[in-house]
Amino acid sequence: MEIYEIAHAAGLVLVFVGILTIIIAGIGLFRLPDLYLRASAVGTSAGLGVAAIVAGVLLMDFSWLNLIKAIVAIIAQLLTSAVGSMAIARSGYLNYSLPAEITHTDDLMKTRRDNFSK
Amino acid sequence: MSADTFHPRGPWIWRIITFLFWYAKEFILANTRVSLDVLRPKGRQKMSPAIIAVPAASESDAEWTMISNFITLTPGTLTLTISREHKILYVHGMFVDSREALVAEIQEMENRMLGAMRRKPGDLSRPVEAPVVEPVDDPEAGDIQ
């Protein structure tokens, strides 16, 4: 039963790492200044948090069927959080959501006909 | 192409394995960096965001999709859009000290990823600075800008 207990403890640690990541992502939602920083920092951190929780639960209750389910769930979670972040950020840019003041370079603005920052 | 750019070498399976481990390392490092900066008190935060046009070497649909996904999946960097015609990735970065630093980071990731996705990496050279894309007067049908 030795290996079972080690896996159980490692699973607990992973679950708590995931919870911590999601809490920090939530704090980031309030503290970051604009849409793009929130999408890049928070969108995928939250995805990672869920992935860590799934991996932790897998370690606590391991079976080969659960392993396959967990791999599919993690890949789907990471892919959808990345695609979702890109869609939100792009639609925000097309809908005149300006980057925060501290953004020092903006190459994408040069490609816009209306140049809405000026 | 600068001389110190990473170029993938070795057999295909080795390139795949090194890319996965390298990406996992970058992913965890970026996560800690972003989390620490989120928790730092206002006024001492180190973020200096920017949107940079990064020249890319991807060719097929799958390569463009995967490189945009990998960039977005790394916390702190985000692909806003791509221009396949001009071969540019528009990347929003959270910690951009200079244009060259972000371009080098993204191009190294792309080199390693293309090395893992292609049987033979082929020619991966591209400029450091992207061409300036001016808006065209006659946009394609359905192009809302």
Image: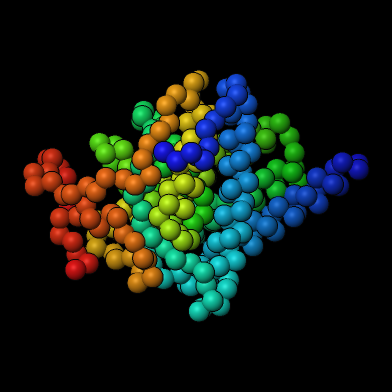
- On the image, the x and y values in percent for residue B102 come to 45, 52
Which one is nearer the viewer's eye here, A73 or A83? A83
Q: Residue at x 47, y 31 (%)?
A: B114
Q: Which residue is drawn at 63% across and 46% down?
A: B25
- On the image, the x and y values in percent for residue B46 come to 52, 69
Tell me: B35 left or right of A88.
Answer: right
Residue furthest front as drawn? B3
Q: Residue at x 42, y 63 (%)?
A: B49
Q: Residue at x 38, y 51 (%)?
A: B91
- Residue A84 in view (yes/no): no
Which one is nearer the viewer's eye here, B137 or A104? A104
Residue furthest right as drawn? A2
- On the image, the x and y values in percent for residue B42 come to 51, 78
- Residue A10 in view (yes/no): yes
Quadrant of the image occupied by residue A67? top right
Q: Quadrant of the N terminus of chain B?
A: top left
Residue furthest left as drawn? B138
Tally of numbered discs: 0
- On the image, the x and y values in percent for residue B70 come to 48, 42
